[in-house]
Image: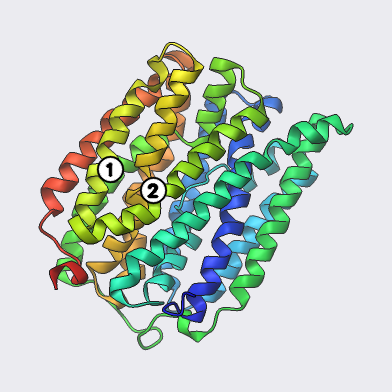
C-alpha cells in the first residue's frame, strides 16, 4: 500500500493527523477561552492577526533558509515552538505570556498555512511521481480532515472534565496540555526524516526564480491574497464564536458541527483528485469553490439554526476541494528546485491579508452584526474564483500538458 510514496512521504502522511487533530480542538476553543479570561472580541481578533503576522515571517524565513539550515531542522524547531506554546497555555493565566506565545505559534488557526505546512508540502512533492502528486496531496488532506473532525469532537471533553469536577480553567488547561503532547509526538516523527527530505540541489547554492516563475508568483500571489482575505473573515475560532453567541451552542455541540464539516470535506478530497484527472486542476478548483462561496453569503441570513447549518455543511462539501488541487498545481508549474522559495514568497502577500482579516472581522462582528463577515468573505472569494479561472485556465501542469 502506498508503495509509490517514499519513506519521507509516508512519515509526513503519518504526521498530518497528529497536527490536524491538535490544531482542530485548540482552534475551536481558543477564542472562547480568551473571552473567558476577559479579552474583548476585537482583542481576540488582534491576537489572531498577530499570530498570522508571525507565521508570515516564519514562512518567509523557512523558504530562504531551507537549503542552508535544512528542512528537517526547521521542522523540528517549529514543532518545539508549538509544543512550548501548548505548555504555556496549560500552566499559566498571564495574559502577556499567553498573547506572546499565541502570536509566535499562530495558535487559533487550524488551516494548512504556516512554515511547517509549507515545508511538508515541498517534501511531499518530491516523494512521488508527477502523475501521482495530486493524489498524494488528496490523501494527506483527507487524513488531515478526518483528524480535524475527530479533534472537533474532542472539544466535548471540556464538558466531561467539568462534570468530573475540574474548574473551567482547569478543563481548558488539560486540553492545552494534550495539545503540547501531540506536538511533541510530531517532533519525534520529524526527527525520523532522512536526507531525501532536503532540497535536491547542491546545498547552499543560489536558486533564483526563473522569469516564468516570477510572473506566476506575482499573479498567483495577488489572487491567493484575495482568497485568503475572504477566508480570514471566517476562521474556525470566529465561526465557533458566532455559533456560541447567535444560537447559544455549547462547546460539545459546536465540536459536532465542525466534526461534520470536516467529514464532509474529507469525502470531497479524493473525489477532487479524480475529477482533476478529467477536467484539470484549475477547473476543479474553480467549479467547486465558486458555488460554495455563494452558499456562504447566505449562512447568517437563514431563519434558524438548522437552515444555517444546512448551508454551512453544504458549503463544507464543496469548499475544500480546491485544497489538494491548489497545492498540487502550485508545485507543478515551477521547477523542483524553485518550489520552497516559490511557496514561501507565494504565501507572503497572502499571509498579510490573512493577518488583517480576523481583526477586521472582529470589528465587523462587534459593530456591524455577527453575520457580516460571512457576506463579505463570500463576495471576495467568489471574485477570486472568477479571476483565477480567467487567468490560469490555459496554464497546464506537466501531467496535463502531456
Left or right, 8 with respect to 329, comes to: right
Left or right, 176 with respect to 163, comes to: left
* Residue 297 visible in the displayed image: yes
Quarter of the rendering containing residue 377? top left
Going from N to C along the chain, the mark reached first, 1 or 2, is 2
* Crowd tier of the residue under label 2, counting other residues whose Cα lies within 10 Å: few below 14, some 14–19, many 20 or above: many
In terms of secondary structure, where does tag 2 sit? Answer: helix
- Frontmost of labels 1 and 2 is 2
Residue drawn where x is 34% and y is 84% of the image: 205
Q: Which residue corresponds to mark 2? A: 268
Where is residue 75 shown, x and y percent of the image? 55, 68
Vertical relation: 151 (above or below) 4: above
In terms of secondary structure, where does tag 1 sit? Answer: helix
Q: Which residue corresponds to mark 1? A: 288
Tag 1–tag 2 contact (CB < 8 Å): yes
Number of the label disc, if any, that sits on residue 260: none
Residue drawn where x is 45% and y is 53% of the image: 112
Vertical relation: 395 (above or below) 402: above
Please count the marks in the image.
2
* Residue 106 visible in the displayed image: no
Closest to the observer: 126 or 104?
126
Residue lying at the far top of the rendered structure: 303
Vertical relation: 309 (above or below) 288: above
Left or right, 312 with respect to 158, comes to: left
Display coloring: rainbow
- The image quadrant where one finds the C terminus is bottom left
* Crowd tier of the residue under label 1, counting other residues whose Cα lies within 10 Å: few below 14, some 14–19, many 20 or above: many
Estimate the spatial distance between the alpha carbons at disc 1 and disc 2, rounded to whole Å.
10 Å
Quarter of the rendering containing residue 290? top left
Amino acid at each position: 500500500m502506498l508503495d509509490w510514496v517514499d519513506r519521507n512521504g509516508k512519515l509526513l502522511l503519518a504526521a498530518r493527523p497528529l497536527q490536524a487533530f491538535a490544531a482542530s480542538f485548540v482552534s475551536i476553543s481558543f477564542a472562547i477561552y480568551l473571552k473567558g479570561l476577559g479579552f474583548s472580541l476585537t482583542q481576540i481578533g488582534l491576537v489572531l492577526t498577530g499570530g498570522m503576522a508571525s507565521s508570515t515571517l516564519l514562512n518567509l524565513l523557512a523558504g530562504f533558509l531551507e537549503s542552508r539550515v535544512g528542512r528537517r531542522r526547521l521542522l523540528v524547531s517549529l514543532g518545539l515552538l508549538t509544543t512550548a506554546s501548548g505548555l504555556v497555555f496549560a500552566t499559566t493565566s498571564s495574559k502577556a505570556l499567553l498573547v506572546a506565545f499565541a502570536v509566535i505559534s499562530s495558535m487559533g488557526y487550524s488551516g494548512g498555512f504556516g512554515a511547517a505546512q509549507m515545508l511538508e508540502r515541498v517534501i511531499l512533492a518530491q516523494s512521488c511521481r508527477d502523475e501521482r502528486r495530486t493524489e498524494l496531496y488528496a490523501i494527506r488532506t483527507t487524513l488531515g480532515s478526518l483528524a480535524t473532525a475527530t479533534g472537533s469532537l474532542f472539544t466535548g471533553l471540556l464538558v466531561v472534565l467539568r462534570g468530573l469536577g475540574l474548574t473551567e480553567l482547569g478543563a481548558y488547561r488539560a486540553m492545552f496540555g494534550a495539545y503540547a503532547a501531540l506536538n511533541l509526538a510530531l517532533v519525534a516523527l520529524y526527527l525520523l526524516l532522512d536526507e531525501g527530505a532536503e532540497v535536491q540541489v547542491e546545498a547552499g547554492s543560489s536558486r533564483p526564480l526563473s522569469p516564468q516563475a516570477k510572473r506566476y508568483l506575482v499573479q498567483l500571489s495577488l489572487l491567493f491574497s484575495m482568497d485568503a482575505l475572504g477566508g480570514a473573515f471566517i476562521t474556525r475560532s470566529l465561526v465557533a464564536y458566532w455559533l456560541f453567541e447567535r444560537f447559544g451552542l455549547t462547546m460539545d455541540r459546536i465540536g459536532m458541527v465542525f466534526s461534520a464539516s470536516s467529514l464532509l470535506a474529507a469525502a470531497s478530497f479524493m473525489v477532487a483528485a479524480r475529477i482533476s484527472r478529467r477536467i484539470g486542476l484549475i477547473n476543479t478548483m474553480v467549479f467547486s469553490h465558486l458555488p460554495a462561496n455563494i452558499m456562504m453569503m447566505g449562512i447568517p441570513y437563514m431563519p434558524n439554526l438548522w437552515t444555517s447549518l444546512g448551508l454551512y455543511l453544504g458549503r463544507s462539501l464543496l469548499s475544500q476541494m480546491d485544497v489538494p488541487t491548489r497545492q498540487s498545481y502550485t508545485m507543478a508549474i515551477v521547477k523542483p528546485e524553485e518550489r520552497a522559495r516559490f511557496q514561501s514568497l507565494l504565501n507572503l502577500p497572502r499571509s498579510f491579508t490573512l493577518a488583517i482579516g480576523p481583526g477586521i472581522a472582529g470589528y465587523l462582528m462587534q459593530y456591524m452584526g455577527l453575520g457580516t463577515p460571512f457576506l463579505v468573505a463570500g463576495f471576495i472569494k467568489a471574485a477570486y474564483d472568477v479571476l483565477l479561472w480567467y487567468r490560469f485556465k490555459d496554464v497546464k501542469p506537466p501531467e496535463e500538458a502531456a
